């Protein structure tokens, strides 16, 4: 009969932990401002103490340039620069649901390791998300996923992504058709100007259905604990269709 010592059990547990490697975010998850062909002029809609920058093309001619700057200042309160300024969309308008297909049971993923430097960056981001109410502590979680921290290419800031592969496998596919880029381009042809709005943390402005919040639970390294999303995070199968 084989004998398992305390030391051998610890060795097996250590081998089951995989260290998380911090890498740059895929383009689809990097919400940094995109490169544009025109050079840009910064317009501060705030104050020197509370800078709220936005940008317009330097190619704009007068009087259109001045008219746009005046318009931006007039409706500056319609824009958000910080998470706490985003109250989210009304649940009556939209919320993200997470139905589960028959025959699938909740999955708790094996823990992954992180380096000390990565863990500290993750902790800072977790505390920021917790402060604005995007996440909350998870208690008695059935579904439990790992964090996949990635770096934004332009800023070097850490983005918290979650490995929802097990939850996605158990979720039915929403076949809502995505817009076709070539048709959108054709639709603006022959126009002299194209105006568009950049949605700040657009996914995070959509709430997760109350009955499904517990399915988004994820574990954090070390002493940070486990949390769940109250708003729609990246990485869910049908998040794009809901958005």
Image (cartoon, rainbow, N blue to C red):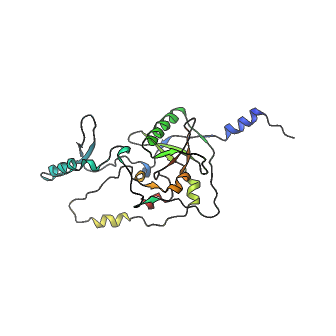
Vertical placement of 194 versus 11: above or below? below
Does the rendering let one see residue 87? yes
Does the rendering let one see residue 57? no
Vertical placement of 23 versus 88: above or below? above
Q: Residue at x 71, y 35 (%)?
A: 10
Residue 242: quadrant of the picture: bottom left
Residue 94: quadrant of the picture: bottom left
Furthest residue toward left: 63
In the image, 28: left or right of 17? Answer: left
Task: Between residue 21 and residue 70, name the one nearer to us.
Answer: 70
Vertical placement of 54 versus 243: above or below? above
Vertical placement of 69 versus 92: above or below? above
Task: Count the labels in the image.
Answer: 0
Q: Tell me residue 12's x, y (percent).
A: 71, 39
Q: Residue at x 54, y 37 (%)?
A: 224
Q: Tell me residue 47's x, y (percent).
A: 24, 37
């Amino acid at each position: 009969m084989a004998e398992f010592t305390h030391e051998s059990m610890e060795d097996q547990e250590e081998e089951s932990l995989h260290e998380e490697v911090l890498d740059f975010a895929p383009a689809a998850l990097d919400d940094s401002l995109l490169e544009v062909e025109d050079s840009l002029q910064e317009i501060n809609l705030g104050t020197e103490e509370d800078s709220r920058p936005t940008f317009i093309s330097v190619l704009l001619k007068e009087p259109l340039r001045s008219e746009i700057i005046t318009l931006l200042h007039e409706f500056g309160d319609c824009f958000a620069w910080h998470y706490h300024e985003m109250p989210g969309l009304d649940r009556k308008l939209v919320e993200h649901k997470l139905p589960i297909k028959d025959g699938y049971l909740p999955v708790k993923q094996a823990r992954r390791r992180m380096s000390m430097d990565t863990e500290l960056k993750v902790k800072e981001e977790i505390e920021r998300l917790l402060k604005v109410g995007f996440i909350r502590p998870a208690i008695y979680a059935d579904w439990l996923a790992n964090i996949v921290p990635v770096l934004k290419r332009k800023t070097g800031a850490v983005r918290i992504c979650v490995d929802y592969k097990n939850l996605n496998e158990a979720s039915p596919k929403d076949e809502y058709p995505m817009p076709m880029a070539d048709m959108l381009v054709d639709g603006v042809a022959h126009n002299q100007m194209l105006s568009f709005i950049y949605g700040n943390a657009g996914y995070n402005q959509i709430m997760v259905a109350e009955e499904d919040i517990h399915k988004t639970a994820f574990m954090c390294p070390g002493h940070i604990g486990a949390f769940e999303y109250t708003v729609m995070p990246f990485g869910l199968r049908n998040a794009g269709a809901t958005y």
